Image (cartoon, rainbow, N blue to C red):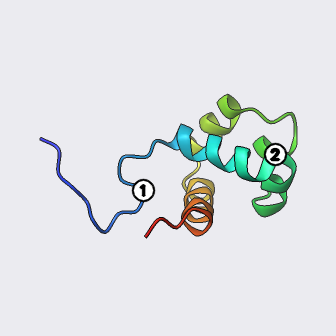
């Protein structure tokens, strides 16, 4: 029962993929400058970042918005 979501630019993109693409594009240091969260600035890893972002809605929103701004695919 999958429905298309034409107005959702993140539809079908996992949080892991978002973090990995942002790290590939910016690197951890620049990503930490863009979004100042500890999991990006102190001993960063995808695993620790995902754990934090899944528990912290405000941080996840910032990461998703940065992804949309960076990789606007429209």
Visible residue check, residue 48: yes
Of mark 2 and mark 1, the one earlier in the sequence is 1
On screen, residue 19 versus residue 31, left or right, reads left
**Whole-percent x, y for residue 58 in the image:** 59, 59
**Whole-percent x, y for residue 40 in the image:** 78, 45
**Residue 25: which disc?**
none
Q: What element carries label 1?
A: loop
Comparing 35 with 55, the one in front is 35
**Whole-percent x, y for residue 46 in the image:** 68, 33
- Residue visible at 86% across and 33% down in the picture: 43
Q: Which residue lies furthest to the left in this view?
A: 1
Q: What element carries label 2?
A: helix
- Residue visible at 78% across and 62% down in the picture: 34
On screen, residue 11 versus residue 2, left or right, reads right
**Whole-percent x, y for residue 17 in the image:** 54, 40
- Residue visible at 43% across and 46% down in the picture: 13
| Circle 2 residues within 10 Å: few <14, some 14–19, many ≥20 | many
Q: Which residue lies furthest to the top in this view?
A: 47
Q: In which quarter of the image is the C terminus?
A: bottom left
On screen, residue 68 versus residue 32, left or right, reads left
Q: Which residue lies furthest to the front in this view?
A: 74
- Residue visible at 75% across and 32% down in the picture: 45
Q: In which quarter of the image is the N terminus?
A: top left
Comparing 13 with 52, the one in front is 13
| Circle 1 residues within 10 Å: few <14, some 14–19, many ≥20 | some
Visible residue check, residue 37: no
**Residue 28: which disc?**
2
Q: Is residue 45 above or below residue 27?
A: above
Residue holding disc 1: 10
Q: Is residue 10 above or below residue 27?
A: below
Comparing 45 with 68, the one in front is 68
Q: Distance between the residues labelled 2 and 1?
A: 22 Å
């Amino acid at each position: 029962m999958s429905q298309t979501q034409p107005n959702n630019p993140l539809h079908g993109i996992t949080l892991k993929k978002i973090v990995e693409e942002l790290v590939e594009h910016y690197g951890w240091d620049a990503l930490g400058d863009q979004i100042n969260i500890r999991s990006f600035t102190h001993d960063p890893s995808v695993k620790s970042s995902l754990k934090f972002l899944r528990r912290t809605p405000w941080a996840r929103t910032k990461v998703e918005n940065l992804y949309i701004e960076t990789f606007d695919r429209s």
